[in-house]
Image (cartoon, grey):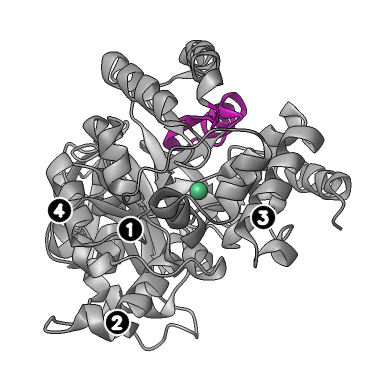
Amino acid sequence: MTTLYSASWVLPISSDPIKDGAIAIKGSQITDVGSGASLVASYPDSTLHHYPDAAILPGLINAHSHLELTAMRGFLESEESDFTGWLKKLTVARLELMTPDDRYISAACGATEAVRSGVTALADSCDGAYESMKALGDVGLRGIVFQESFGPDPRLADDNFARLNAKVARLADLETPLVKVGVSPHAPYTVCGRQLELISEFALTEGLPLMMHAAESAAEERLLREGRGTFAEALAKRGIEWHTPGVSTIQYLKRHCVLQTKPLLAHCIRVDNADIETLKESGARIAHCPKSNAKLGHGRAPFWTFLDRGIAVGLGSDSVASNNTCDILEEARFATLMARSDTGEMSGRRMLAATDALHAATAGGARALSLEGHTGELKAGLQADFAVVSLAGPHQLPSYDPINTLIFASSGRDVVLTVVAGKEVFRAGQVITTDEERLAARMKEIAVKLGGA
Ligand SMILES: [Zn+2]
């Protein structure tokens, strides 16, 4: 049985926008894309859902999230001037105050926020991967859940790696056609070199995707290049030995085999031309998180240069503790404006266009997650992952061009339908797969426990 979805615009990404277009869906797949009139004629027995004054686009892809931290939205504002203190408060709250069920509720709330804003796939990094995988599965999202590993002390590298190994083995049972497991050595300042090598080898042997935070903060750069600063002081205080490599994060990751895994790297702000060439040569992918980077005062990644060099780059919200929303349309607008505001990077180039940002939010994100050929575009044979965004709001009118309207005048709140693998998960203002009232009530309880509201 074929179902047709038609709208005033269909934006396949892989080809030109189609005015009065439609897509045909059978099971979990897209079977046809074209003009509404031609698809209605080709599939006379199909069910038709028509959305006037709206655009159908590939599901948005969030290339970097931490859904288990959704309960920490607004929780860390007073720590933002001190990244080390910010991370410490977050870690203590996550490990000592939140139960596994709290983490599940937090992840499920984050997942409902995602589908409400047209996201159909995420690369989610978390300590409680079991709960995040369950939440993604229950809400009906596609994604890779990266089990985090921590351990800056080289003496504990083997034990920490064994723990990660055991956790990943337990997660295999939760894998589905939509939700897959990955591994994430958290960051260069929280995982020692030997542990990075063990995890990289493991990822290569087991064929697991690997994600890592890289080249994010000034404190990280100082630790790696000079062996000084707040991260260095924190390691010294814990009696952990640190041999300053004296190189950039990207060269450090190359040295410790991480780049061999073609990792997904979040942030990549502090990169020079040599680093960008290394990233390109290694086939690493990037999750560009401009709002989180700006909010925490970390700076701005060279988004334009990544695109220019043909590096796979998607857009990530990072956790809502540092954003404070999981809204990839808003992230795309911010990414475009930030890139345009960097006159140095823009020198001699055309302006970054709304089409570039929409590409990064969809097909670019799919490449970043190694899901190209499965999702990220509207094309026959791909998975039926798509969103319908209204273009009729007073804040959007008039609309001379649907892609400019989407990027410069719309947000996730304009999404009216989200479909993952052919299944409607958000429709008519409601997430169909979960009890949102119960989740909201539990979220308030967690906030009280964390000492907030
Ligand atoms: Zn992150």
Question: Which residue is denoted by mark 3 in the rendering?
Answer: 86
Which of the marked residues, 3 or 4, is nearer the chain's N terminus? 3
The answer to whether residue 414 of the structure is visible from this angle is yes
Which of the marked residues, 3 or 2, is nearer the chain's N terminus? 3
Q: Which residues are magenta?
A: 127-153
The CA span between labels 1 and 3 is 28 Å
Question: Which residue is denoted by mark 1 in the rendering?
Answer: 361
Above-or-below relation of 212 to 70: above
Look at the numbered disc 4 and give the secondary structure of its residue. Answer: helix
Task: Give the amino acid type for the residue marked by disc 2 in the picture.
Answer: Arg
The CA span between labels 2 and 4 is 23 Å
Density class for disc 1 (Cα within 10 Å; few <14, some 14-19, many ≥20) is many
Q: Position of residue 45 (x, y in %)?
A: 25, 40
Above-or-below relation of 304 to 404: above
Question: Which residue is denoted by mark 2 in the rendering?
Answer: 340
Does residue 277 appear left or right of residue 71 in this picture? left
The CA span between labels 3 and 2 is 30 Å
The CA span between labels 1 and 2 is 17 Å
Which quarter of the rendered picture does the N terminus lie within? top left
Q: Is residue 447 magenta?
A: no
The answer to whether residue 427 of the structure is visible from this angle is no
Numbered tag placed on residue 277 in the rendering = 4
Quarter-of-image position of residue 109: top right
Which quarter of the rendered picture does the C terminus lie within? bottom right
Q: Residue at x 31, y 19 (%)?
A: 201
Task: Give the amino acid type for the residue marked by disc 4 in the picture.
Answer: Glu
